[in-house]
Amino acid sequence: MSVTAAVLAGLDEIRARQEQLYRDLHKHPELSHHEKETAAKATAWLSELGIEMHDGIGGFGAVGILRNGDGPVVLMRADMDALPVKEQSRVEYESEATAVDDEGTTVPIAHACGHDVHVACLMGAVELLIMGRDQWSGTVIALLQPAEETADGARRMLDDGLAQLIPAPDVAFAQHVLPFAAGTVGVRGGPFLTAADSIRVTVYGRGAHGSMPQASVDPVVLAANIVVRLQTVVSREIDPSETAVLTVGSIQSGSKSNVIPDSAVLQLNIRTYSDETRTAILDAIHRIVDAECMASRSPKPAEFEIFDSFPLTNNDRGVSTRVSGAFAAHFGDRSVPLGRQAASEDFSDVPDAFGAPYTYWGIGGIDADVYNKAAAEGRVSRDIPVNHSPAFAPVIQPTLDTGTEALVVAALAWLAA
């Protein structure tokens, strides 16, 4: 029996308990910076395994350290937070949770991005590595990260002294459940997830009665012209071979039909795979907004605020090749090619702080028969719920088994080498 097979032999023993943890986490989600019970359930699991624990890092972050003799240090991360979304998946363990958000509003909450899958898989992987510890040597760090959705959870853990609590990793891993066929797994070297920036732009006009537009500088019209011009940035200023996204997600202005307001606020989101493209798009946004404000006779300059910035996830090619080979050996044809994803993550802040190479892969979470039928009929983009959709709820199996196995297989590519 191979080392991998020997370690994974315990999967049947832990599967039912792991699935129950997943259902519990899914039914009781928590928002970013509020992951108290989620962290408590995960740390309780790890504490029962008898490994060294540190919690309360950067909020509700935690790390478990499994020391097993000399050898490489492997870090594996799972994010824990959920989203302000009303779930519509109709699974029996559907979330009915609500919470008061940072704005003081009561909102529904759901694990519409699959972070509950990530936590359950990490717990299972650590337990299997403990059960099979005679098969490998080294150190495993299980990192439970809060606030991934707000792009500051990893940084807060680092600012709160993470580097003083754990040994420097030789390699770091993370994974994400994606809207692909369950049972599949894929890794890609190089830029994989985009850098992302959200930008709040406030433009100013001059308010007036709706019946007297000649006395105004209308910020609604100004904002509308900005939106139209921004649509040309990616299509006309970025090399067609370079992937980029610029989305206007929100425009807010005015309160009444017959009142021309004096300001408008636009919220933009950009996704890029290189610093050069990011700079070009940010420069274009400033140029277009300033020019439209001048053309509209805006009484004062626009204001720009960048928030919720995510770093580029740039998978180390050597690490990715090694992990890909291990996946191919274990999963066979379920190890599939994976293209770039336009989503964003803050995971890379952790390995980058240590100067450690990393890779981040995807696992499928959609019932394979449903997904394959939709793919054959060209209906994937219409009919398959994606991350952040109210209907996104990965099938429990084989999703959990695949994610658990992927973490173990990747870790053993170093620990059992």
Image: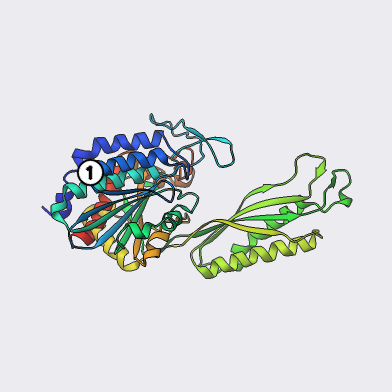
From this viewpoint, is residue 30 visible?
A: yes
Colour convention: rainbow
Three-letter amino acid code at disc 1? Leu
Which of the 4 image quarters holds residue 317?
bottom left
- Residues 5 and 373: in front is 5
Which of the 4 image quarters holds residue 377?
top left
Q: Is residue 85 above or below residue 244?
A: above
- Residues 377 and 406: in front is 406
Q: How many marks?
A: 1
Q: Classify the position of the C terminus by image quarter.
A: bottom left
Q: Residues within 10 Å of mark 1 (few under 14, many from 20)?
A: some
Left or right of 211 on screen, residue 17: left
Residue at numbered disc 1:
49
Q: Residue at x 35, y 59 (%)?
A: 164
Name the residue furthest left. 1
Q: Is residue 365 above or below residue 170?
A: above
Q: Position of residue 288 (x, y in %)?
A: 69, 63
Q: Regarding mark 1 in the picture, which secondary structure is present there? A: loop
Q: Position of residue 88 (x, y in %)?
A: 47, 33
- Residues 353 and 107: in front is 353
Q: Residue at x 37, y 57 (%)?
A: 162
From this viewpoint, is residue 394 visible?
A: no
Q: Position of residue 225 (x, y in %)?
A: 73, 56
- Residues 178 and 369: in front is 178
Q: Residue at x 34, y 62 (%)?
A: 358
Which of the 4 image quarters holds residue 341?
bottom left
Left or right of 176 on screen, residue 50: left
Q: Position of residue 367 (x, y in %)?
A: 35, 40
